Amino acid sequence: MQTQGEVCQPGFFKASPYSRYCSKCPPYSYTYDKGSALCQCLDNYFRRDNDPPSMACTRPPTAPQNVISNINNTSVILDWSPPADAGGRKDVMYLVVCKRCSVDLIECDECGSGVRYIPQETGLKNTSVMVVDLLAHTNYTFEIEAVNGVSELSPIPRQFVSVNVTTNQAAPSPISVVKKKKIAKNTISLTWEEPNRPNGIILEYEIKYFEKDQEISYTIIKSKETEIVVDGLKPTTVYIFQIRARTAAGYGGYSRKFEFETSPVSLPAGDQSQMPIIGVSVTVGMILVAVVSGLLLSGRRCGYSKAKQDPEEEKMHFHNGHIKLPGIRTYIDPHTYEDPSQAVHEFAKEIDASCITIERVIGAGEFGEVCSGRLKLPGKREFPVAIKTLKVGYTDKQRRDFLSEASIMGQFDHPNIIHLEGVVTKSKPVMIVTEYMENGSLDTFLKKNDGKFTVIQLVGMLRGIASGMRYLSDMGYVHRDLAARNILVNSNLVSKVSDFGLSRVLEDDPEAAYTTKGGKIPIRWTAPEAIAYRKFTSASDVWSYGIVMWEVMSYGERPYWEMTNQDVIKAVDEGYRLPTPMDCPVTLYQLMLDCWQKDRNSRPKFEEIVSILDKMIRNPCSLKMLVNASTRGSNLLVEHNTMGLGAYRSVGEWLESLKMGQYTENFNESGYTSLDVVTKVTLEDLKRIGVCLAGHQKKIMNSIQELRVQCVNSMMPV
């Protein structure tokens, strides 16, 4: 180095003439001149005005990675991973660009100010955002860009990751304007405006009314028009009215409360327009009425009863109770049709075989090959599809069973349920055509990408699955075989529930299914009451969902490892539950345990599960606390007696039980010669021992955590 008064050589600089020493040019900068006061940045590297001269030159970050979208009606949650290269800076932030696109995604326009972003659209420091107030049944493209302090200085085109989503049908927005038309001694005539956001075709309106301060006793009328005459009212009495609209997606929220009073005497028709307006809207919240209790008072009728309204209107009376009203779509079992082909043609669109191009075989099912290909419908762009074919020489029963899956799938319309494009039944081979899921089954996808996703991204996948299952549960459909192998993943990392063929072989592995008198059951994923009594309900699907959570958090690990089906049945019945996967947040593992409650009525509903996961996504801090040995010891129920310390006489025998006997010598040479010592092994220790494969590390660490729990349980007072 040179002292003050000496000139800095090329490659060195002195920012201040009062500095004693010259400094070497920081990374990605240079100077070829003597006596330089500043080093210039290399091409495509930059320095902000307020960056100190001694700081390395930096560049814009690369695009974010692994974006995942979760759609909930007309809102979407986007999660992504940070860019692989932050450009050498720590001030990375994100911005989201929303575009509304045509069906073929060719023409896209900016979404504009009608869309809201939570917490914000630009300047995001976290890797997630919720976009709300989107339109129903609309295609959107979201571009997520990472920027840092020098992004604006770079002439290189912006780098972003994009994801395409299609919102699904949403319930209509609340009705905001309700006006009185005519008022008499015993009648009130009302009119209202359509919701600002109908989100589809309004099928009908529901009018709820009751005497003021008598909300527990109310009446409901339905109308297909935006006006109604309510009769049978008391004179000089104040009534409260609330109205809501229904589309194919269900009911929207009730309007605020509107207050109108009947007149003391009947007025001539000509004088109606002179009546003063006495309707006053109030903003008090509506009191939710309890679920059907059977305590309807004898003075009120329960059910539909024709009133004096228009034939299009129907009236129901309630008192201290609630009746589920028609309107929400309900699943119809295709096997209830006398002619199964009628169900297929009612729920599935017939496709001409000439529109389909089969490209390659991607798998095999019970009924035939599964292929990928292209579908080109008249007037629409060509797009990729998956094609299930029915093998030649099929029987009538095989054909019915094959097409029953299409009859089931065709009834569903949800972004987290595999979408049926149609069927080919009028030519051979008979085919079922669905959307193509580029990343295949979730279990295989996770195994290929072991450890590559953040916890919040895994929670996003789980949220999507739970959303799909909530939809199925609301429709009254029980899946019976919910497992990671039956979840498919597309190129946007959206997870979708699939495999609705209830009569197929569950897996090639004979240990995967347990045959009972009623058919095959996937034991490792099935609730105890479903195994013992074939009690399949939405609650048994929740148990299976807990197993899927475990599969996702363990990146596709096989539930219960090498235990036989009979051992699994016995262990679960005795209270054993799967231990927490490595690096699993406490809140997620607790949700798994809740799903595995023996009493099915104690398990959460899918609606609750979606709500819990949404809260985790909005509050990532809740996922930071990981399960450790002590919390596992307190949460885990009594373990199956073949899995503890006492079950193994040596480290070698323990490793052999895991089919990891090749590491016995490594453990012994590293000084881990007793199971007591093995319980203290960490992941770093495993690497030093010589267990290098991530899958082997995970399997051994899970078993070590099992041994730790056994130690904790053995020390607990009985």
Image: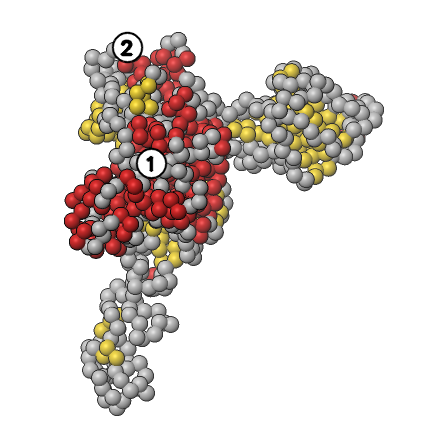
Residue under numbered circle 2? 396
Identity of the amino acid at label 2?
A: Asp
Q: Does residue 299 appear to the left or right of 144 in the view shown? A: right
Identity of the amino acid at label 1?
A: Asn
Front residue of 197 and 521: 521
* Sequence-wise first label, 2 or 1: 2
Tell me residue 605's x, y (percent): 48, 33
Q: Does residue 232 appear to the left or right of 337 in the view shown? A: right
Rounded to the nearest angstrom, the CA distance separating label 2 from label 1 is 49 Å
**Which mark is drawn over residue 641?**
1
* Label 1 packing within 10 angstroms: few (<14), some (14-19), many (20+): few
Quadrant the C terminus occupies: top left
- Which secondary structure lies at badge 1? loop
Is any part of residue 382 visible from this angle? Answer: no
Tell me residue 231's x, y (percent): 72, 21
Tell me residue 677's x, y (percent): 27, 52
**Which mark is drawn over residue 177?**
none
Q: Quadrant of residue 237?
A: top right
Tell me residue 146's x, y (percent): 35, 55
Q: Is residue 407 above or below residue 718?
A: above
Q: Quadrant of residue 549?
A: top left
* Label 2 packing within 10 angstroms: few (<14), some (14-19), many (20+): few
Residue at the right extreme of this rendering = 265
Residue visible at 41% across and 13% down?
A: 336
- Which secondary structure lies at badge 2? helix
| Nearer to us: label 2 or label 1 | 1
Q: Is residue 340 above or below residue 131?
A: above
Residue visible at 41% across and 38% down?
A: 637
Residue visible at 29% across and 87% down?
A: 20
Quadrant the N terminus occupies: bottom left
